[in-house]
Amino acid sequence: MNDNDVPLSELPELSSIKQAALSYVNEAFAEAELDGLDADCMAQAALFAAFTELVATYGEDAVAQYASSLADKIRSGAFSMAGALKH
C-alpha cells in the first residue's frame, strides 16, 4: 500500500516520498523565481494544479472535506513549519 491508498485525513505527516515531491516543487518555485515569475502567481498555479490532481484521485467530496481542514492547519503553523524544509 502507498500513500495514495490512504484517505487524506490519515496523512498528517510527510512521508519520505512526499518530502521528495516537496523538494521538486520547491525547485520549480526557485527556477520560476530565477525566470522572473512572481512567487504568489506560482503558489496560486501550484494550488490549482494540486487540487485538480487531488480531485482526479480522490473525488470532489473527499478533497472538499480535506480543504475544510486547511484553515486550522494554517493557523496552527503546519505550513510555516513546512517552509523550513525549503532550505
Image (tube, rainbow, N blue to C red):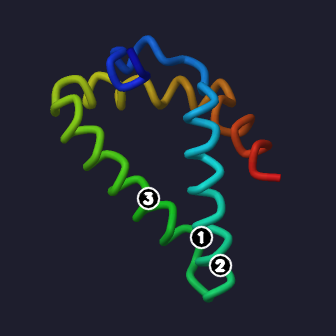
With respect to residue 62, does 34 lie above or below? below
How far from the left and from the top, in percent, is residue 48? 33, 56
Mark nearer the N terminus (3 vs 1):
1
Between 31 and 38, the one lying in front of the other is 31
Q: Residues within 10 Å of mark 2 (few under 14, many from 20)?
A: few
The disc at residue 51 is none
- Left or right, 87 with respect to 35, comes to right
Cβ–Cβ under 8 Å for marks 1 and 2: yes
| Secondary-structure class at tag 1 | helix
Q: Residues within 10 Å of mark 1 (few under 14, many from 20)?
A: few
Between 5 and 11, the one lying in front of the other is 5
Task: Give residue 28's quadrant in the image.
Answer: bottom right
Mark nearer the N terminus (2 vs 3):
2
Kindly report the distance in space between the C-alpha atoms of the residues bearing marks 2 and 3.
14 Å
Of tags 3 and 1, the one toward the viewer is 3
Residue linked to disc 1: 39
Residue linked to disc 2: 33
Residue positioned 48% across, 72% down in the render: 41
Task: Give residue 73's quadrant in the image.
Answer: top right
Kindly report the distance in space between the C-alpha atoms of the residues bearing marks 3 and 1.
10 Å
Residue furthest to the bottom: 36
Q: How many marks?
A: 3
Residue linked to disc 3: 46
